[in-house]
Amino acid sequence: MDTDPMGADARPPAPARVAIFDTSLRDGEQSPGCSMTAAQKLRFAHALAELGVDTIEAGFPASSRSDLDGCAAIAREVRGAGVATLARCNDGDIDACARALEHAERPRIHVFISTSPLHREHKLGMSRDEVLARAVAGVERARRYVDDVEFSAEDALRTEPDFLVEVCSAAIAAGARTLNIPDTVGYTTPAEIRALFEHLRTHVLDADRAIFSAHCHDDLGLAVANSLAAIEGGARQVECTINGIGERAGNCALEELVMALETRRAWFDATTGVDTRRLVPTSRLLSRLTGMQVQRNKAIVGANAFAHESGIHQHGMLKHRGTYEILRPEAVGWAKSQMIMGRHSGRAALADRLKELGFTLDEAQLNQVFGRFKALTEKKREVFDADLEALAAGLDSGNGIAVGGWRLLRLQVSTGVGEGILPMASVEVCSPDGERHAEAATGDGPVHAIFAALARGTGVHLDVESYHVSSVTTGEDAQGQASLTARIDGEEIAGSATSTDILEASALAWLDIVNRLHRRDAAAARRDSAGETGEAATPGFPTPRPRVATV
Ligand code: KIV
Ligand code: ZN
């Protein structure tokens, strides 16, 4: 018997467990600049499982054959986290989900339909009754395949509350276990969404038989605040993405949500299963895979999140780190000390640190990175984590960046200021088949000239939409990181590269985009030759008659 004089009932209730549903590979991956190959998605799904998320939304199998295959690979290989796939409420989509999830350890089919008046009228052309009937039919069909069915009422935050209650009640009766309430257009506010969750939990029939879930977009910069407020209102699942990637302004950033719950545990009284020390490595891995960098001042995972520059702050930090830090950088996966390696560091120390950063290298790869590391220490006194990542990022597909593709062999640039001076670049590149091409071009500036020469050398035309250079670390000898996006057949593709020379970094970032296209097309060609109906290779790649790239 319990001899506690206060009685068992007097014990404080256990903190609420909030399930983390990561949709980086679905809502995130479908957004501009974030596309990944099936191999990259699989690599990232393993990282999410290691991070400790409860469910990984792997994709939208009905959208393409390659997405179905990518989801199936994740379902087959990833263990430790549930795997969900998305479907509209129609038979074809749901059957494609079932096929993709056949070998999943914990499969979940996620069906959705829009419920708001705006979407009903303008997107679906359906009445309330028709939407309700489709929702029920969708959940019932999904339940024929799996026990774990999630239902989402798209644009829920702009749906009439009485209709939302009706749809949610019907979805539970049809067998849904999770009811997701998306703020599809990032319109709500914390007080409003909290009140909505409270309303749903008290008015939906058999509400206790389902988990209520929040899915907030960041159009007004409120996605994390709204998700936290939804938890206060009773949400026990939050849908989010690493680095907040996602449609338009993105989704609720997983790392911010988890660290808010962790840091303000006494306030929220809620926990997650996430290993917070994996947050920074997972964020970095996503940036490497997609080429989409996070801004320096991004909470938790941005390069400045724990940097103290001003004298007053540094003085405070030296006295007591709590003066200006509410989190320990180590708790989210930053190195204890920023300056960790130098010219005397050995191979074992390098391997250890790279492992902590999420790179598992074989002997040959380690030798390659070690050689580059030693060369870098000749140019730079201090080698930071970001430098090491930049060195390792040029490696194999295990880290998401494939070997092969186009390589830059030589780059020479002449530029200057003054009348009659024309910036000029000459390059020599090596094709994936080993052919060398040397070309030269002039441009409005040195970077423009480099891109024009590369376009000639590779035969690929890129419409560069954005280009920026930032320093990876600090100091005059810092490595520069160049990031580009280009639009190819309507799709935005991002590329990035790092070097102590920003012109070289720019050229490599341009080639990074070309190599991403190359890998995608090679994968499509492999599927075709295996007799599958894969997606067509990128039309026009490589273009036989290159045009001049624009910056
Ligand atoms: O934002 C949204 O409404 C969605 C649903 C498909 C869940 O992503
Ligand atoms: Zn969404």
Image (cartoon, helix red, strand yellow):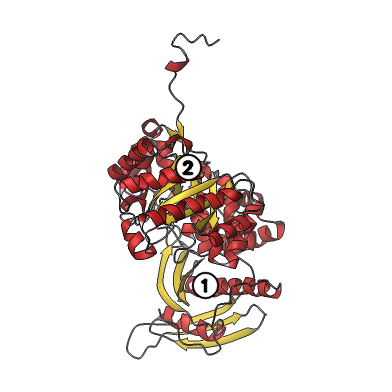
Magenta region, residue range:
307-311
Q: The C terminus lies in which quarter of the figure?
A: bottom left
Disc 1: which residue: 513
| x, y percent for residue 377 | 56, 59
Judge whether residue 296 can be spotted in this image: no
| x, y percent for residue 380 | 51, 60
Dot 2 lies on which element? helix
Whether the residue carrying mark 1 lies under 8 Å from ligand 2 is answered with no
| x, y percent for residue 375 | 59, 63
**Which one is in front in this view, the residue at disc 2 or the one at disc 1?**
2
Q: Residues within 10 Å of mark 2 (few under 14, many from 20)?
A: some
Question: Residue 370 or 262: which is nearer the viewer?
Answer: 262
Per the rendering, the mark at residue 173 is 2
Look at 51% across and 41% down and name the residue there: 274
**The residue under label 2 is which amino acid type?**
Ala
| x, y percent for residue 406 | 60, 76
Question: Residue 232 or 163: which is nearer the viewer?
Answer: 163
Residue 310 falls inside the magenta stretch: yes
In the figure, 18 relative to 73: above or below? above
**The residue under label 1 is which amino acid type?**
Ile
Q: Which one is earlier in the sequence, the residue at label 2 or at label 1?
A: 2
In the figure, 256 relative to 284: above or below? above
